[in-house]
Amino acid sequence: MRRLRAGSSEQVVWRARLVLGCLGLVALCFQHAPGQIVPDSRLELTAGPGGFLLRALHLWDPHSPFGQLQTDAYGYLFPIGPFHWLLNALSVPDWVTQRLWWSLVLCVAFLGIWKLCNVLQYGVPWTRLAVALLYALVPRAFGELPTEVWPMAVAPWILLPLVSPRVRSGWWRASWSAVAFALIGAANPVAGAATLVVPAIWLLARVRVKLAAVWLGFVVAVSIWWLVPLLMLLRYGATPPGPRWAPVAGVAVGVPLALAVAHYLRRLTNLTVSRGVHRRVVPVLATCLAVAAALPVLLTRPDGAFAAIPAHWEDAANWLDEQTAPGSVLVLSDSNEPLAALVKRPLAALTDDVRNRVDSGVADQALRQQLTRDGVRYVVVRNDQQDGTPALAIHESLADAGIGRVAYFGPAGETRLPYPSVEIYDVGATTPGRLIPRSRLVAVGGTADDVPTVVTALGGQGAAVLDADAKGKLDGLPFIATSGRQAERQPSAVVLRNAQVGRSACLHVGMRALCSQDQAKDSAEPNGLSRSVQLPQAATYQLRGTALPQEGEALERLLSVPGAITATASSRAVAAPEGRPDAAVDRDPGTGWLAAPDDPAPSLTLKLPAARDVRGLRFLADSYVSGSRPADVVLHFDGGAPLPATVDAAGYVRFAARHARTVRIEFTATKPLQDARTSPVGVAEVEVLGADELRKAVDPQRRVPAYCGNGPAVTIDGVPARTQIAPTLRDLQQRRPIAFSLCGQMSSIPLRSGLHQLEVQANGGVVPVETTLAKAGFGDVSVTPVQGVDVWRPNPTELTVEVPAADGQSVLTVAQNYSEGWEAYDGTGQKLTPIRIGGWQQGWVLPAGPEQVVTARFMPDRTYRAGLLLGLVALLGILAVAVFLPKRMTGRSSRR
């Protein structure tokens, strides 16, 4: 009786210690960045779990960028998603919900190892407690996300029913083990599968083949709800996110390692005691190790933690959802978060071509046309973080493309100018679908990245399909080559481009230039285009293309003004024309000269057209020219004796009139423009008192005198051809695209069959970035235009389109990613042939016919949802077996 009471008392003590252990883990979780939401695998779990789970009920998600297959959202349907949804419905603060989930993960891991060690009689109570704490804490100490640790937390519970020493039926053991496995969910299916390794080895090692078969069947049954979606993803080409292998390895070896540690800690204690070491040394060391595992969780502050999603993001999402105009939202950032978790309007994907265009700070209507073709209505610029592209480049690209800002939210972001945290730009009217006549389509021999350039080069009014996608569906389309590879058929045009045009060190806000060498980015082909072109047959082509101003003396000679003061300098901070020495005497406060940072003795020399009586200078500063102001100078007139002078508060240097033609200014001392930052001397303008009328402004509207040969230098198989350009000076100053074409006697280029070497090189202050060889007459505007069509979506996997009458074959496109799973039917019920447009967009070939309604469905969604339903039924069935079947089977089955 006393032993029973003692045992019962000891159990109460250890249960109390287990409760304290769990409370300690909960406290640890809540002490980790309290009040802060830590970035986890899915922001939607805290920001909008309801909408996230609803979208996970369908295989196709039109809300994701340009619509796409679900990747791993279905894996959160149980149990992680419902846990977060329930607490969100109860208005629990987001950070508290997250900590409660963390607490659940750690406590489940802690109690699971404790119970498993007890059942298997590994170690003694204190070693079991220490190992359980370490098992729960070590993954978090190494920074693993709770979602990734969750399979490791549940792993002991999968093994526990199988190894229980009590007399239990095989059905009971298999069903409860399977139920425990089902609780892992499928947010990390590889790690979940790894939890089965140890139970499988346990069963096979004990030759429990029948039990192993039942157990495996139950495990498969409770996994149907995520196995079917996973197979559907693989079938239709989507790749689920790859696992992090450290958590997977931890799942596979964690349980055996914990059991081994519990066992050998006891033996180590006995060994140390037998050698005269105090019996509490090993427990104390184990306790210290557990504390050490907890310290990183307690002391570290995770990167990117935030108290709540800033209100300006919620305001931006609400504004976008309130707009009735159709079209998707493009976020010019590497991440769509947090907007994706808040907005209901569909999102667009940032393609490489759009990224390169906005990154360059150079754009025109081609950017706007491309976004319109892609169904993008609104562009979101986030200034609360930087992704490598200067905000100035993004704003200049959008401004040059004619895309204006319509809303903004939040405080000033982390940008050179105080732009609001979130800005929304309106691209203009667009439609989510288009009806493209066959006459407007071309086949491109290249990649999807070449398509926007080809469409732009051919006038921007049509569409393109990759040649491989057109075969067997739209044969006979005009062929456009984009590289020097052997063409299978004669190209109607050849389009060559520089994929990365670089970025100038000077970017613009309106007419103001903000220059910094840190903003510059090299071009992939700084001197022009050099390509080999292979033609199957002889043909005659016309050549045209697009060039950009090229920094250097040739460009700056074009910007010089006759009869004006000119300037030279000892150095310059940037090579861009806005930072040339002449910018200090061009009457434009938006440009200016800035010395190089490593110039030990900066100087600026002014040269007048003729000698004049000069009686003073005035240095004008501008906040856009981020240099220090002159404080002390030394002046030299026509190379004469030096004249030291001090610049007064108004920027003046006055002296007795000097008759001179050149004035050399040495800057010997400076003072900061706005703060104490050290920077090179800079001057926005230098007024020359006595001859200031000779400072002449560059007329931005004046065109460069056009003559044959002032454009890029063209050489074909060693034979030169001349081109011509007629840009404005503003085009040259602000690095805008400039058209060029052949001129002179060679208005077209006859080419024989075979290999040709084409060189289009920089000349006349411009460098070519795109060149098109097109047959005469090709690309003329067709009488049949591309028409926009409205698309209605009764649910995420169905769409309906009202298609106008068409006299000939057309292609109906929808601004979403292509998938073989979409099937469309015309008004007569005839199935339409699917085709990928532009390398990514969903399309169907539509025969000529009257106005009709086209319906499309994503057919795999039926199997996906059936799998979810069947999985739910199977899971409930296994749970019923576990709950309602007797624990012990009578008779012969019991003895087995």
Image (cartoon, grey):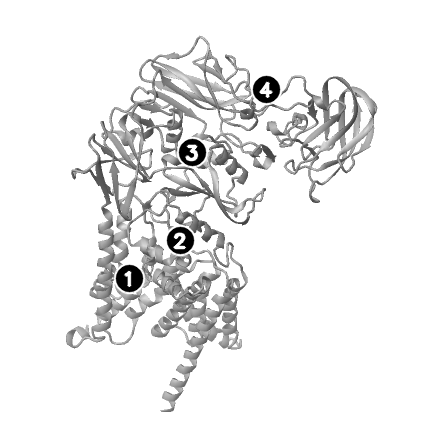
Q: Earlier in the sequence, mark 3 or mark 1?
A: 1
Q: CA separation, marks 3 and 2?
A: 43 Å
Q: Which residue is mark 4?
A: 558
The 10 Å Cα crowd at callout 3, few under 14, some 14 to 19, many 20 or more, is: many
The answer to whether one can see residue 266 in this image is: no
Query: Helix, strand or loop at disc 4?
Result: helix
The amino acid beneath tag 4 is Leu
Q: In the rendered view, does 635 fall on the left or right side of 769?
A: right
Q: Residue at image x 74%, y 26%?
A: 688
Q: In the rendered view, does 765 fall on the left or right side of 597?
A: left
- Point out the frontmost of discs 2 and 4: 4
Q: CA separation, marks 1 and 4?
A: 79 Å
Location of the N terminus (image quadrant): bottom left
The 10 Å Cα crowd at callout 4, few under 14, some 14 to 19, many 20 or more, is: some
Q: CA separation, marks 3 and 4?
A: 30 Å
Q: Earlier in the sequence, mark 1 or mark 4?
A: 1
The 10 Å Cα crowd at callout 1, few under 14, some 14 to 19, many 20 or more, is: some
Q: Which residue is mark 1?
A: 200
Q: Residue at image x 53%, y 46%?
A: 420
Q: Which residue is mark 3?
A: 368
The answer to whether one can see residue 166 in this image is: yes
The amino acid beneath tag 1 is Ala
- 890 over 448 or under it: above or below: below
Q: CA separation, marks 3 and 1?
A: 59 Å
Q: Earlier in the sequence, mark 1 or mark 2?
A: 1
Q: Are marks 3 and 4 in contact (CB under 8 Å)?
A: no
